[in-house]
């Protein structure tokens, strides 16, 4: 039986970030097929933490460098660590703005060093889609298992659309990811001299 798609979620109904977190975790725990907006570092962090919390086997991330304050936030690092401790977990990362010096300063990548269930690759290829004005916009995204996603369409403002139960969109994003990921150059974290 096909699940009815819900689209009437209004993030303005939440008074603060804790309300937002409760709403996001409710959607994830109840497998709600509700697409909702996500913007700003704090709300983005809540969505990423929730994806890592509820993903059981696989998370794929396509992004710029991932060497920034956001991924260096201890809450982000802890969420990734907890996911990687799950049996059968696998994290695949594809970065398109790789820089050796930035990588050496990254507490996020330092934490991933030595983990056999993590693969990091770099590629010059980027993901694009047309916006409402028919202009090309670069995309970053994260997909969890076969149903969760956060699709960032405004990288500078961290504006994204998210859903915790939309296998169709995840399948599309993963198909694009799987086309580029095998061609990417492996980033061997064991060879990087991290600064701290």
Image (tube, grey):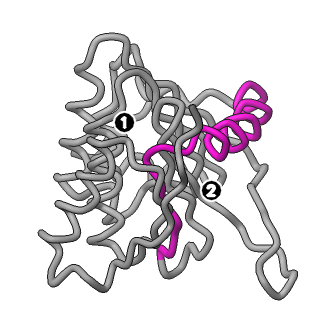
Q: Quadrant of the C terminus?
A: top left
> Quick one: which residue is furthest to the right in this view?
134
Determine which quarter of the picture holds residue 5: bottom right
Residue at point 32% right, 39% down? Answer: 52
Residue at point 17% right, 60% down? Answer: 22
Q: Is residue 140 above or below residue 169?
A: below
Location of mark 1 (residue): 193
Return the mark for residue 97. 2
Q: Position of residue 75 (x, y in %)?
A: 18, 53
Q: Which residues are magenta?
A: 158-184
Residue at point 33% right, 31% down? Answer: 112
Which mark sits nearer the N-terminus, 1 or 2?
A: 2
The reply to whether the C-beta atoms of the residues labelled 1 and 2 are less than 8 Å apart is: no
Number of the front mark, 1 or 2:
2
Please tell me how crowded label 2 is: few (under 14), some (14-19), or many (20+) other residues with Cα within 10 Å: some
Q: Secondary structure at mark 1?
A: loop
Indicate yes or no whether the magenta region holds residue 175: yes
Q: Is residue 132 above or below residue 9?
A: below
Q: Quadrant of the N terminus?
A: top right
Residue situated in front as seen by the camera: 109 or 36: 36
């Amino acid at each position: 039986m096909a699940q009815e798609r819900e689209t009437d979620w209004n993030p303005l109904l939440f008074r603060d970030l804790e309300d937002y977190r409760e709403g996001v975790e409710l959607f994830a725990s109840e497998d709600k097929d509700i697409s909702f907006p996500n913007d700003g570092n704090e709300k983005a962090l809540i969505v990423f933490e929730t994806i890592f919390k509820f993903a059981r086997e696989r998370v794929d991330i396509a992004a710029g460098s991932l060497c920034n304050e956001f991924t260096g936030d201890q809450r982000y690092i802890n969420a990734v660590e907890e996911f990687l401790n799950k049996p059968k977990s696998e994290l695949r990362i594809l970065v398109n703005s790789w820089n050796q010096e930035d990588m050496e300063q990254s507490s996020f990548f330092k934490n991933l060093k030595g983990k056999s269930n993590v693969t990091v690759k770099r590629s010059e290829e980027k993901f694009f889609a047309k916006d409402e004005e028919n202009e090309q916009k670069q995309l970053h995204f994260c997909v969890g298992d076969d149903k969760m996603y956060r699709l960032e369409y405004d990288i500078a403002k961290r504006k994204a659309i998210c859903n915790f139960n939309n296998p169709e969109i995840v399948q599309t994003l993963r198909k694009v990811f799987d086309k580029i990921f095998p061609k990417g150059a492996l980033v061997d974290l064991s060879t990087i001299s991290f600064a701290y």
